[in-house]
Amino acid sequence: MRPVLLQPLFASLSTLTGIGDKTRTRLAALLGGSAAAADSPLNAPLPRLIDLLHFPPYAVIDRRAVYTVASLPAQKIATLTITIGRHRPPQRRNSPYKITASDAGGAMELVFFQARGDWLQKQFPAGEQRLVSGKIEYFNGVPAMIHPDYSVKVEEASLIPPLEPVYPLTAGLSGRLLGKAVAQALERLPELPEWLDKAVLRQEKFPSYGEALRLLHHPQQPEDIAPAGPARRRLAYDELLAGQIALRLTRRQNRRSPGASLPLNNNYTQKLRRALPFQLTAGQEQSLAEIAADLADSRRMLRLLQGDVGSGKTAVALLAMAQAAESGAQAALMAPTEILARQHYAAIAPLAEQAGLRAVLLTGREKGARRAALLQHIAQGEAQFIIGTHALFQPDIAYHNLALAVIDEQHRFGVEQRLQLLAKGKGVNILVMTATPIPRSLVLTAYGDMDISTLREKPQGRQPIATAMLSSAKMAALLAAVRRALARGDKIYWICPLVEESEKSDLTAAQERFAALRAQFGAVVGLVHGKMPAAEKDAAMAAFKSGAIRLLVATTVVEVGVDISDASIMIIEHAERFGLAQLHQLRGRVGRGDKASSCTLLYKEPLSANARVRLSIMRETEDGFRLAEEDLRLRGEGDILGLRQSGLPDFRFADSSRHRDIIEMAAKHARLLVQDEALWAGEQGEALRLLLYLFRQDKALRLLQSG
């Protein structure tokens, strides 16, 4: 049960004065919930008053400077006392209503569009003084304030906030109304016990949780809402600490959960090693040793295998799957797309056969008798490796003995989908893989419950990729180079960001580019995109692999995992529209064989400063870990290759690029707190429980109670 002390903060938005059904619906949408949830049972996730308090402003309007008419700054907010003069109603339709006003320094105008004259006469009586605040514009040398933000009697000056927080808004919801709602919620904020150690409070100069919220929503200085300010850092630390405690408790629970023990006996694994056409790198050997030890343990494995593009994660996964087979168990490998699943199958099945194992492919395309036969092979244990897409966890699939789940590009699957696969076995060990190198700060915040193996080296024989930037104004020179490359027999990817031309976008579409290149170079040009039927995609990829197609126009459907080893040229059109990690993934489709490879970043002028920095970094390095750090710095944690969909924390206060120091501090602090089980029975433990409730970590509390 939620503590009584916190119940006022988990009240419905409807309990606030001035919040009707429409406003509540809009607030719910803004806060990330639903209108229906606003009055649902207390365990409904959103929206509650606490969610309003945990909705920070992103800027402040500074109204502290007081001006005279003679000193008014253009395009800035100004506050001044004026005497109301003549009213000039509009002479023509759609013309503004103007009011002349003045002080000792000169005259100005107050300007209103589509306002009622009788209301303006009442609000601004001629001859009276008013204190007004708003943005100043100049027209023909005369200062004007269009629709003042505030206009009050001089004795009501306290009604104008010196520093006004600015919140993200949605249609039909004003900043003034949101501010009033937040002010009411703050009034209900109870006095809470302190959950942070005194040493942390002193070292970081943190205010209390309540004081931090008050400073954030009623700032005394512009710095009070800044990420580097004490108030925001305190709330970010609380948010990070709550998340880290939850991850640590989850990790402890996972470690206590029995897993399928799969000792290494070097039967199938040695046969597979001999079948591999290459030598494993030191990084692969290290990762395999870590995974082998996990699988042999009686506790369930939960490990993240992260590696740069082309670092050889699939080979590591294959040998882990072979270790499961040595105990008579099955391993499933789940990929996010059918193209990638089929590619995994094509690479794994022949190697498995050499080791005396059987791999099957299960996607949504298998139907009827073929599907029934596959399901029978799986259910009877005749197939040791099951490779597929979402089809792997459908209700009609029964495994004989699923003991290892390998989830490729795991951020593309929802949590529920992963759990559905794990429910197909008992104590299933989990290996998740990503080719998106994840910065350390994000690893801590998102994967603190996992053990992590990292591959940094590329397998022997991989070629460096020469990367160049080219303006689309030089398209003719590029096409001439493409013609020469095709004459040499090279294979080329040409990536476009859209499938079809859109009236709302000037991005070149894949279908448009395909038509133009096909007209110029003939039948060697092919097309693949996500909207094509699966059979057509397969046929296009097979033709590219065989060489029947040598110039493949594609969308980012080829971004992850596609392996055509003799493709040596990558052209990315509108490269300025992509993030660094995505550009790196695309570039990684070439340089996989023994041919010298290149990547051309084709951009459209003018380039923004940010885009120029991104493309320049791409030219400088092929190190995906450095690129991921730069991507985080430039774009924030939510945008790294679409990781916002991944189950990464959706922070309200913390910022992975600006709060790296307190991320590491919170991780260490959480580890010590979770280890000290006696602490949770005392006063600090009770206070920490409040923290977990406030930041929606109720599940962690259930883990805490279960021990």
Image (tube, rainbow, N blue to C red):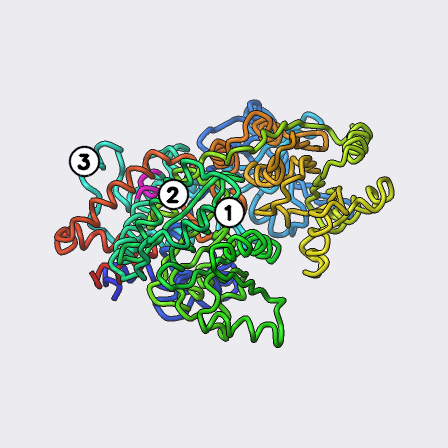
Compared with 244, 707 (above or below) is below
**621 left or right of 325 in image:** right
Residue 276 visible to an observer of this rendering? yes
Q: Give the distance between the C-alpha atoms of the residues marked 3 and 1, in whole angstroms.
A: 35 Å
Name the residue: 60% across, 34% down. Answer: 101
Residue receiving disc 1: 168
**144 left or right of 622 in image:** right
Q: As shown in the figure, which amino acid type bears the numbered disc 2?
A: Ser
* Residue range highlighted in magenta: 233-237
Q: Nearer the viewer, mark 3 or mark 1?
A: 3
Pointer 1: residues within 10 angstroms few (<14), some, or many (20+)? some
Nearest the eye: 688 or 12: 688
Query: Are circles 1 and 2 on residues that touch, CB within 8 Å?
Result: no
Instruction: Label 2: state its secondary structure.
Output: helix
Q: Give the distance between the C-alpha atoms of the residues marked 3 and 2, in whole angstroms.
A: 38 Å
Residue receiving disc 2: 287
Based on the picture, tell me whether residue 234 belongs to the magenta stretch: yes
Compared with 471, 390 (above or below) is below
Query: Are circles 3 and 1 on residues that touch, CB within 8 Å?
Result: no
Instruction: Specify which label sits upstream in the sequence, 3 or 2.
Output: 3
Instruction: Label 1: state its secondary structure.
Output: loop
Residue 217 visible to an observer of this rendering? no
Measured from the top left, where is residue 326 in percent x and y?
Answer: 37, 58
